[in-house]
Amino acid sequence: MYPQVNKEQNLPSAPPSYSDSMNAPKYEPYNPGNIPIGHSYNAPTMGPPQPTRVIVVQTEPIPLPPLGPKSVQLTCPTCRSLVTTRIEEESSSTAYLCCMLLFIVGCFVCSCLPLCMDNFKNCKHSCPSCGSFIGIYKP
């Protein structure tokens, strides 16, 4: 079942001692191009490493004109093109609060009126070319 070991082979009984291992031949490092050991290699094309230069470009923030309930012509801060803003109107939280208050007081018919009034709508301005949000106007 197991292979037979030939007892006639001269196998060591233990690893070498410390003194025997110290007398072993010394390891010599790889020496490409016959460079004398102990000398550093400096090719004429190699020099000290150059520091990495980081260039930071800061742009001036574009001042935005005051936003209102109507479209405004401005330079988009994201895509830097001259555009007329796109407006999306939403009812504000004040409009919903007034609706609830009118409903509680008993004006059931008039309770939806603040949702239709322009004075209770927030206007979100965005860029039509890149779609980025520019600002919001709250009356």
Image: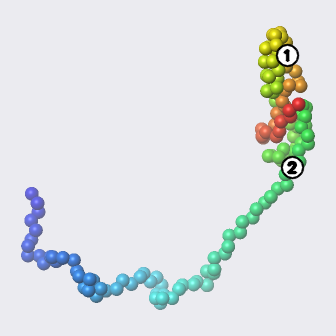
Q: In percent of the image, x 79 and y 14: which residue is there?
A: 104
Can residue 129 be seen in this snapshot? no
> Is residue 14 rendered to the left or right of residue 78?
left
Residue 91 in the image: state x and y as whole percent. Answer: 81, 25
**Mark 1 neighbour class, 10 Å CA radius: few under 14, some 14 to 19, many 20 or more:** few
Q: Residue 91 or 99: which is nearer the viewer? A: 99
Task: Report the quarter where the C terminus lies.
Answer: top right
Q: Residue 59 or 19: which is nearer the viewer? A: 19
Tell me the kind of residue under disc 2: Ile
Q: In percent of the image, x 85 and y 19: which residue is there?
A: 114
Can residue 47 be seen in this snapshot? yes
Q: In percent of the image, x 82 and y 46: which residue is there?
A: 77
* Residue under numbered circle 2: 62
> Is residue 10 rendered to the left or right of residue 61?
left
Residue 20 in the image: state x and y as whole percent. Answer: 25, 85
- Up the image or down, 1 lies above or below 24; here it is above
- Up the image or down, 78 lies above or below 29; here it is above
Q: Residue 58 or 116: which is nearer the viewer? A: 116
Tell me the kind of residue under disc 1: Leu
Name the quadrant containing residue 8: bottom left
Residue 113: which numbered mark, if any?
1
Disc 1 from disc 2: Cα separation: 39 Å
Residue 17 in the image: state x and y as whole percent. Answer: 23, 82
- Up the image or down, 86 lies above or below 75; here it is above
Instruction: State the count of labels.
Output: 2
Q: Residue 94 or 43: which is nearer the viewer? A: 94
